[in-house]
Structure formats: C-alpha cells, structure tokens
Amino acid sequence: MKILIIEDEINSAKELERILVKLDIQNEVTAILDSVKASIEYLQQHDSPDLIFSDIQLADGMCFEIYSEVTVNSPIIFCTAYDEYMLDAFETNAVSYLLKPITEVMVEKALGKLKRLKSVFEPAILKRSIDRLSEKFKASYKKSILVEQREKIIPISVHDIACLFLENTVIRIITLTNQQYFMASTLDELERMLDPESFYRANRQYIINRLSIANIERFFSRKLICRLTVETPETIVVSKANSSDFLRWLEGGTTKTR
C-alpha cells in the first residue's frame, strides 16, 4: 500500500513510517510532507496514494486547506493532539484518527478499520467528513480575548477587534471604536486562536480584521498597502509574495497561507 504522510514534526513522521513498515512490509511511504503548500503541490503532480496520514495543524495552516484546494480520492487518517469532543463526530464518518503520541497499537487499529470500511471511502463521503471536522475546528476559535487592565480582566469580543500588532515585545489591540489594550502574548499564538476567515496575518507585525479594512492601495514592487478604518502607528504593507493570497482572502476565497 502506497502511503503519504503529511506531518510537520519529522520525528513523529519517521516513527509513523517505522510502525507502518513493521506492521506490513508492503506498506510504502511515498513521501513525507511538512506543509500545506508542499502537500498541495505534491498532490497536484502525483496520483492519489492508497492512504494519507494527515496531521491537522501544520506550520503554514490547517490541513483542510489542502483538501479544499486539491481533489483527493484517498482515505485519510487524521493525526491530532486535540480533545476527544471533536473525534466522536468524526469517527462516524468512516475516517479514523490517531491521538498523539502515536503508538503501534493505534496505527494497527486504524488500519484494521480502514480495511473493513474501505468500500465507503469515496470522494463525496471524504468531503463531507472533512467539512464536518472543519466546522468543529471553526467552532473552537476564540470568541473573546482576555486582557488585563490594572486589577481588572476585560473580555474583548474578537468581532470588535480592528487589528492586533506587535509593539516591541507587547501586543497592542485596537478595537473598531479606537479603544486600545495591551497583552503579553505573541502574534503566532493569537493567529492560531483567531478564525482565518475573519483575520489575516498581513505581515510579521500585524493581524487585521476583515471588517476594519477601508481600502487597499497598490504599492511599488507589486506590494499592497492596507488602510484600516482606525489609525495605526505604522503603514500596513502586504508583501508581493502574499498580495494575491491576501486579495483572495479579502474576496472570501480559500487562502494558501495564514
């Protein structure tokens, strides 16, 4: 059986490969891919494998971006570190999962289930499974962010946030009504908490809310300047490399990066 592993932790991927070969010498791992971008390119250029082991959260985004971009005819076994409340619904859709850390027993059980249910792994069924699990993850994004102000802890609805940006080592939050708050965190952490349909990582310093965008200006070297409805300390520049992706996101399309 030809197997594709999509996993950004190389040690985990190699351990999974070792287990698969140990369980059946005919199992062949055709590739180990560590990103959404690399996976899309590989699947566009190669025939669908017999099976995909797919991590859910990759370095450059969620794995669901892969399967919305490329038609995949392979059964998928998801690898995840997320809580079991997401897994119950997913188990009923004929696509299994492995809860990290992965063990040989877990892999053997998942392959056994695949063998029993292989006849139901059709593209339409896979798409419904992925869509349902994607909705579960969407529901897990933060609805509010807690900030401390003096002795108070204040919840800020994410819908009220215009942008978040890194200022020295502190995150400053500006709301749509021009209120400002500060918090100790990183943009990487906040990016994972926020729904990518509403928020975009414009550059290394800024995450912006779709609702706060006033207009976009063309800049030299095919860069973009993003003007918000609130004042920002610096001009928000979207790089040439991300400009097409950003405009696709602004129109409501699927992005390749976050």
Image: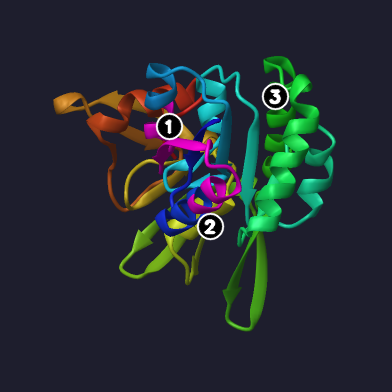
Q: Position of residue 191 (x, y in %)?
A: 49, 51
Q: Could you tell me how many numbered marks the image carries? A: 3
Q: What number is the disc on residue 39?
A: 1
Quarter of the image with the C terminus is top left
Label 3 sits on residue: 126
Q: In the shown orientation, is residue 34 left or right of residue 149?
A: left
What is the spatial separation of the Cα atoms under label 1 and label 2, in whole angstroms?
41 Å
Q: Amino acid at mark 2?
A: Gln
Q: Position of residue 241 (x, y in %)?
A: 26, 31
> Is residue 143 within the magenta segment?
no
Give the mark nearest the N terminus, 3 or 1: 1
Label 2 sits on residue: 179
Whether pointer 3 and pointer 2 mark residues with C-beta atoms closer than 8 Å, the reply is no
Q: Amino acid at mark 1?
A: Ser
Q: What number is the disc on residue 244?
A: none
Q: In the shown orientation, is residue 224 left or right of residue 73?
A: left
Q: Is residue 187 above or below residue 113?
A: below
Q: Give the foreground label among 1 and 2.
A: 1
